[in-house]
Image (tube, rainbow, N blue to C red):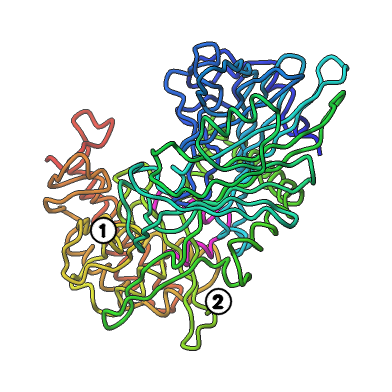
């Protein structure tokens, strides 16, 4: 496989005019504020912040990965930095020169130059919404390939490592333990906290589970080492290989900064080298705590566990074995997304492609276990961590809402699994209020509800959102199971909208950072759309009486809201109903 073929010629030869930030390399379709690298789950979310678009010659490495991710390429005994910003006293590797960056819905490609060799890095986080096992597998690929640019033969070897920060990036004083598997077709380093706390976050990072870094075992061409960052990296810089030694002095993340490294000798490269594949992942079990009837807390696991007795190693092997096919599936998905979104505009296509990994990277597909301990694959629920907001709540309705289009587009069933978690909780009667709950818990991954009613209430916002999403799911799929099973809740929320939407009371909306405000035009509009959604739902269920009733209410409310909200001059609606 040739990684270069995955990058369009345009990405190497021209700077996209719509780039957000001015940079010295080619960026396609645009150069965003942060570039996705390994983005697969709430706790496998590595991005390359761009700031003002710092280039390699500014002294910042071309790719600065979150959580301690470093890499070198050795070309004819000359060392180049290709990943991160590692510093080893007494050494001075040259920064590889970044030539281009391109991202798609699933992948980010970098083209770097290291003297007589070009290097291509492919960060792929597959988006496989129709395969629950694959979509819930929390691993991502890094593939590297070298090409001789002058036709001459060059000795080339690749080095990458991760630091213990991947076990807990938010607190480097915590003690970690680690182990390595250096037999079989795949080599794997595992690092985890010595003292785990299930379902507990510290500054947005989970204090549970383990990070896994793996690569293919290519015989004597593959070497490994764990130990202090400067020692391990100096070993490769000085020798081009690692020592095949494993340090077992467990310590704090910042105590001599332990790293977990692999090196791959590509041999003599006169044309295009083989592709070297690494994988990065973060796994925990159980994954989510969910409240069910009677105030019972249920432990839920990633769906992927149902297809593997040992996710931690066999699943990694299967993931690496699937690399070529995963890339082909990713390309097919990317092409469809780009084609469909480009029908709107090229700029829109860039935003959509950038958004897809962010949306799916915030979600986890889970299952429960039966009384005998077997996996209950008929009980599928999905959970979403707030990303790019306060980062705490789980299954926040007005955060699901802006992610809803990508779910309808890729696989509406995933949207159903999100909605079911909310419906099932509220149907137990444990949520004490008449309007829809804002979220399922104050801190991810604890979906423990708000039985005391103490939630961040957005009454009109969330009632409207739940009705709108429920209708759109039903329209898209013709699956009436949600509206049949939860008709009482839907009618209850609609009744609240009927009573409160025309003149919204003092409350917050999804723009909660702006604070509470009475008479919000946006909430009045959200309310009447929600009422009309329920009219459509009633029609689907053959309830002509409620369909007519709700439609007539909307017909009455709309002109009143427009009259109250239209600003002086009649050219736009105001923030509040002001007349």
Q: Is residue 577 above or below residue 490?
A: above
Which residue was labeled with disc 1? Answer: 442
Q: Position of residue 374 (x, y in %)?
A: 54, 82
Q: Quadrant of the N terminus?
A: top right
Q: Residue at x 55, y 70 (%)?
A: 478
Q: Is residue 534 above or below residue 59?
A: below
Q: CA distance from mark 2 to mark 1?
A: 27 Å
Left or right of residue 67, residue 219 in this image = right
Q: Is residue 521 above or below residue 555?
A: above
Q: Residue at x 46, y 88 (%)?
A: 371
Label whose residue precedes the other's in the sequence (2 or 1): 2
Q: In this orientation, does residue 406 appear?
A: no
Q: In this orientation, does residue 512 appear?
A: yes
Question: Furthest-bottom residue in view?
Answer: 372
Which residue was labeled with disc 2? Answer: 377
Left or right of residue 80, residue 566 in this image = left
Could you tell me what secondary structure mostly forms the magenta stretch? helix
The segment highlighted magenta reads 401-418
| Local secondary structure at mark 2 | strand
Q: Residues within 10 Å of mark 1 (few under 14, many from 20)?
A: many
Q: Position of residue 431 (x, y in %)?
A: 23, 72
Q: Residue at x 81, y 17 (%)?
A: 149
Q: Is residue 344 above or below residue 548?
A: above
Q: Quadrant of the C terminus?
A: top left
Report the front residue among 307 and 251: 251
């Amino acid at each position: 496989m040739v990684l270069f073929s995955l990058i369009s010629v345009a990405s190497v030869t021209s700077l996209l005019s719509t780039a957000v930030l001015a940079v010295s390399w080619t960026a396609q379709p645009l150069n965003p504020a942060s570039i996705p690298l390994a983005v697969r789950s709430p706790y496998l979310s590595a991005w390359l912040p761009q700031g003002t678009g710092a280039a390699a010659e500014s002294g910042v490495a071309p790719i600065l990965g979150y959580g301690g991710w470093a890499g070198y390429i050795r070309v004819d005994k000359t060392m180049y930095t290709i990943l991160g910003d590692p510093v080893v006293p007494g050494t001075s590797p040259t920064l590889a020169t970044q030539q281009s960056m391109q991202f798609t819905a699933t992948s980010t490609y970098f083209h770097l130059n290291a003297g007589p060799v070009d290097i291509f890095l492919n960060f792929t986080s597959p988006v496989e919404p129709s395969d629950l096992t694959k979509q819930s597998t929390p691993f991502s690929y890094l593939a590297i390939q070298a090409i001789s640019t002058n036709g001459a033969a060059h000795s080339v070897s690749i080095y990458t490592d991760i630091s213990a920060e991947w076990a807990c990036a938010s607190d480097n004083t915590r003690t970690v333990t680690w182990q390595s598997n250096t037999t079989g077709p795949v080599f794997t380093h595992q690092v985890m906290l010595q003292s785990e706390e299930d379902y507990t976050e510290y500054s947005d990072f989970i204090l549970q589970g383990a990070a896994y870094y793996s690569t293919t075992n290519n015989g004597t061409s593959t070497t490994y080492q764990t130990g202090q960052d400067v020692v391990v990296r100096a070993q490769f810089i000085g020798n081009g290989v690692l020592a095949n030694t494993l340090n077992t002095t467990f310590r704090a993340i910042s105590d001599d900064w332990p790293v977990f490294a692999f090196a791959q000798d590509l041999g003599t490269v006169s044309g295009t080298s083989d592709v070297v594949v690494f994988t990065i992942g973060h796994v925990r079990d159980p994954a989510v705590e969910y409240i069910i009837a009677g105030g019972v807390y249920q432990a839920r696991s990633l769906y992927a566990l149902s297809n593997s007795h040992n996710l931690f190693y066999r699943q990694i092997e299967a993931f690496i074995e699937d690399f070529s096919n995963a890339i082909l599936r990713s390309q097919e998905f990317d092409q469809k997304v780009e084609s469909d979104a480009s029908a709107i505009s090229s700029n829109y296509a860039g935003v959509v492609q950038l958004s897809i990994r962010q949306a799916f990277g915030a979600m986890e597909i889970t299952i429960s276990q039966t009384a005998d301990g077997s996996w209950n694959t008929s009980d599928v629920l999905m959970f979403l961590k707030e990303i790019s907001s306060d980062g705490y709540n789980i299954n926040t309705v007005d955060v699901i809402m802006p992610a809803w289009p990508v779910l309808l587009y890729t696989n509406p069933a995933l949207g159903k699994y999100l909605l079911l978690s909310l419906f099932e909780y509220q149907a137990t009667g444990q949520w004490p209020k008449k309007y829809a709950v804002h979220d399922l818990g104050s801190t991810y991954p604890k979906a423990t509800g708000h039985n005391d009613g103490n939630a961040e209430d957005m009454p009109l916002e969330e009632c409207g959102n739940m009705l709108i999403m429920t209708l759109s799911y039903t329209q898209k799929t013709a699956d009436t199971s949600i509206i049949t099973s939860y008709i009482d809740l839907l009618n209850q929320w609609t009744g609240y909208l009927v009573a409160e939407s025309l003149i919204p009371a003092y409350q917050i909306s999804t723009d909660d950072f702006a604070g509470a405000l009475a008479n919000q035009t946006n909430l009045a509009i959200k309310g009447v759309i929600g009422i009309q959604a329920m009219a459509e739902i009633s029609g689907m269920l053959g309830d002509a009486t409620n369909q007519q009733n709700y439609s007539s209410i909307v017909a009455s409310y709309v002109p009143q809201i427009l009259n109250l909200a239209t600003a002086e001059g009649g050219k736009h609606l105001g923030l509040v109903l002001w007349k």
